[in-house]
Amino acid sequence: MSVRIVIPTVLIATCLGCVSQTRQPEPTITPQERMTLQTRALDLLLRAAESDLDVVAGNAIEALVEVAPRDGIPAYRLATQSSSPLKRYAGYVALGEVKACDNRNAFAARVNDEHRNVRLAAAFAAYRCGRAGAARLLVETLTDSPEEHLRADAAALLGRLDEPRAKGWLRAALRYPANEDSDRVTVQIQWALANLGDRPALEELIRLSHGSTPTRTDALLLLAQLGDPQARDALEYHLVNLHEEYLETRLLAARGLGALGDPSGFALALESLTFTAPATTNVAEAGNETFVVRSLAIHALAEIGDPRALEALRNIAANETDERLQVAAAYAICRVLGRT
């Protein structure tokens, strides 16, 4: 299904093309314009959550959990019945996050899903809804699974359980040889511990943000999600001191600083909304790079919360042909309007 929408033009008195150091006046939006823009953005997310494109639906569900958690419950439930493992995963994680616990037996049944990542999501939802034994599957996967991505998923879900005992499970998992040898899993475990209040884990995650490119990217994304002031120096370094070839890293830093109330990356993020990867012999790679940079820019603007970005975000939500970017823009609109 298409999630293209037409949002009436918002009368924003600003020049979005201006990225100089002089701060432009904040836009003026009437209450009616605000309501219209927010309603259309939320409607896009709700419809996208039922998209036949599972990546689009998964992104929309994740966005709804943040900006309209209860409004999305029917979509989360519908997703758990999908033939797509990705949609089932997103649906169960969302139901667990918002503690929509009216069908706990279904969660328990899905722990036997044919797809192992869906089992993890169902176990997460079941635990969040009172089935303490469901955490065993997450712990066993983190320590025993031969598949790196499943161990990383298990670590992430353990960090979102809001369960103090998970700290012990995660620390023990760090000592397993397979996890010691995997930067991807190590970063995810450190984030999970930090999300549960472990300060040494936060320090380690900050150290990892200076590692190799894949590790640095993962660590910066997770630091942005944490929004902890202790990471400010590292985020400022990555925003200011890296060269243009590290645009993705700089946008992640802008996002993290935005979560701390620091708008330093606003101009970079706004400018990057129109980024197009250089022409290469591999069209698919160029297209993917364009998507990644624009998506990172949108999410940075969502965290920064500056209403001067609303007109550009509205245009993406209304006119962009990539539905993933439409969903990201609608999410960002909801975040910005929620802060202003």
Image (cartoon, helix red, strand yellow):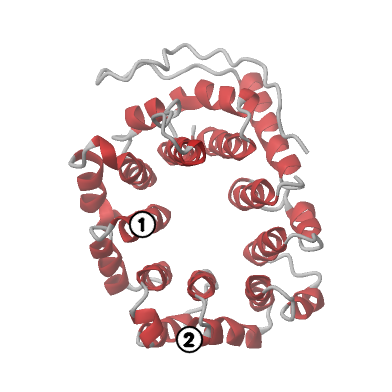
Location of residue 93 in the rendering, given as x and y in whole percent from the top left corner: 64, 64
Cα separation between marks 2 and 1: 24 Å
Q: Quadrant of residue 122?
A: bottom right
Q: Is residue 151 above or below residue 59?
A: below
Location of residue 45 in the rendering, given as x and y in whole percent from the top left corner: 68, 41
Labels 2 and 1: the sequence-earlier one? 2
Residue located farthest toward the left when viewing the structure as drawn: 241
Q: Is residue 254 left or right of residue 42?
A: left
- What kind of element bears circle 2? helix
Q: Is residue 127 left or right of residue 181?
A: right
Residue ID for mark 1: 223
Q: Amino acid at mark 1?
A: Leu
Classify mark 1: residues with Cα within 10 Å, few (<14), some (14-19) or many (20+): many
> In percent of the image, x 40 and y 27: which residue is there?
270
- Tell me the quarter of the image containing the N terminus: top right
Location of residue 102 in the rendering, given as x and y in whole percent from the top left corner: 80, 69
**Viewer-nearest residue: 25 or 291:** 291
Q: Quadrant of residue 129?
A: bottom right
> In percent of the image, x 67 and y 17: which residue is there?
8
Q: Amino acid at mark 2?
A: Thr
Q: Is residue 227 above or below residue 274?
A: below
- The answer to the question of whether label 2 and label 1 lie on touching residues, with beta carbons closer than 8 A, is no
- What kind of element bears circle 1? helix
Classify mark 2: residues with Cα within 10 Å, few (<14), some (14-19) or many (20+): many
Location of residue 179 in the rendering, given as x and y in whole percent from the top left corner: 39, 80
**Viewer-nearest residue: 227 or 289:** 289
Q: Is residue 332 left or right of residue 241?
A: right
Q: Report the disc number at residue 143.
A: 2
Mark 2 or 1, closer to the camera: 2
